[in-house]
Amino acid sequence: MPDKLHEMGEAIQDVYEGLSEQDTLSHSQHKSLGHLFLLVRNIAAAAAATLFLLSLFHVAYSGPLKAVAYFLGAAAYFSDILITTDCFRTKVPHNEMFMEYCFGPLYILLGISYLAGH
């Protein structure tokens, strides 16, 4: 039983490290900025998800809600780029950054389309 508890504790630690990106931030030249960008990314992603869920209930102004959600999603992707590249000081292969480079600008365009009346 103690082995199972130890394994479960290690699994929880692995999840925490994956969510906090401690490995990425430990090599950063801008640790305090990295933690700030991580906080901004997580808040923006949570707020975007919340707004997207609210917009599913066909509330009034669901178009502007989706627009703001897309802009927050773009902010989350941009924060992720800043975290991963250490504020553009570290060269990261494009194949690792494809999602951020593709969906960040796409979210901005989708946000604009919802503001323009979709």
Image (tube, grey):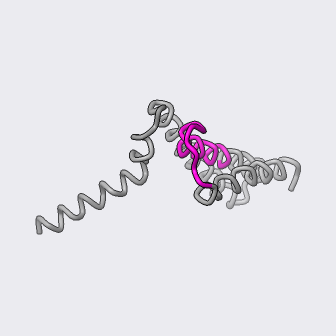
Q: Nearer the viewer, residue 110 or 118?
A: 110
User: Where's residue 48, x and y in %?
Assistant: 63, 49
Looking at the image, residue 117 lies above or below residue 79: below
**Identity of the residue drawn at 55% across and 49% down:** 46
Looking at the image, residue 94 lies above or below residue 40: below
Q: Quadrant of the N terminus?
A: bottom left
**Residue 56, picture quadrant:** bottom right
User: Where's residue 80, x and y in %?
Assistant: 57, 46
**Identity of the residue drawn at 50% across and 41% down:** 38
**Where does the magenta region start and end?**
73-93
Q: Nearer the viewer, residue 61 or 118?
A: 118
Looking at the image, residue 10 lies above or below residue 38: below
Number of marks: 0
Is 104 on the left-hand or right-hand side of 9? right
User: Where's residue 43, x and y in %?
Assistant: 54, 43
User: Where's residue 70, x and y in %?
Assistant: 71, 50
Is 16 on the left-hand or right-hand side of 40? left
Q: Nearer the viewer, residue 43 or 19?
A: 19
Is 44 on the left-hand or right-hand side of 104? left
Q: Quadrant of the C terminus?
A: bottom right
Is 32 on the left-hand or right-hand side of 87? left
Q: Can you see residue 60?
A: no
Q: Can you see residue 71?
A: yes
Looking at the image, residue 4 lies above or below residue 41: below
**Residue 7 part of the magenta segment:** no
**Residue 89 part of the magenta segment:** yes
